[in-house]
Amino acid sequence: MIRHIYRRRVRYRECDPMSVAYHTFYLDYFEEARTEALRDIGLPYKELEDSGIIMPVVEASVRYLAPARYDDMLEIETIFEEIPRVRVNISYTVRRENEDTLLATGTVVLCFVDTERGRPIPAPKAIRDAFSSEFSAEASGAPEAKA
């Protein structure tokens, strides 16, 4: 399992008139967290795109449990539970920094697509290798969550 923590502050423009983070921004938070988690394991999304691979979202869900508010510092945890094949299943938790209360949970499923053909493809070897390396490091006792 790969776990990554991404921290970001709720901006004023993301809030409704009651200073509550508007629900659609959680998908943006997930995207930011996922992008940084991939970068952290050596897979910057820009390099994947430059190599002719895109990863469109094919499924997404969010469960809202408590409100995030303007200026809250959030911790979005990204969890990869398995090495990707054709799809990448990702789970998320959202909390305020230094608090245990869950604000939201979610899942996103991506697939690998060859931009030249516009067709789904199996995860490229470089991606499988990067994930395998991280899973091996975690199994050997390396820290689970990266920030």
Image (cartoon, rainbow, N blue to C red):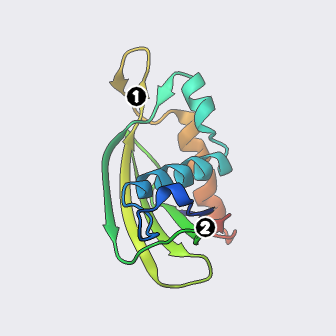
Q: Is residue 79 left or right of residue 122?
A: right
Assign a secondary structure to mark 1: strand
Tag of residue 113: 1
Q: Residue furthest front?
A: 17
Q: Is residue 31 above or below residue 140?
A: above
Find numbered disc 2 in the image and state the secondary structure of the residue it sits on: helix
Mark 1: amino acid: Val
The image quarter containing residue 26 is bottom left
Q: Nearer the viewer, residue 118 or 65?
A: 65
Q: Residue 139, how many percent across, how many down?
A: 60, 67
| Image location (x, y in percent) of residue 138 | 62, 65
Q: Amino acid at mark 2?
A: Ala
Mark 1 → mark 2, Cα distance in angstroms: 30 Å
Dot 2, how many residues are within 10 Å of its Cα: few (below 14), some (14-19), or many (20+)?
Answer: few
In this figure, which residue is indicated by the disc labeled 2?
139
Left/right placement of residue 121 relative to residue 2 reads left
Give the percent coordinates (x, y) of residue 41.
65, 50
Residue located 39% across and 43% down the image: 110
Residue at coordinates 53% horizontally, 42% vertically from top-left?
128
* Tag of residue 102: none
The answer to which of 78 and 32 lies nearer the viewer is 32
Q: Residue at x 40, y 70 (%)?
A: 104
Judged by depth in the image, the label closer to the viewer, 1 or 2, is 1
- Image quarter of the C terminus: bottom right
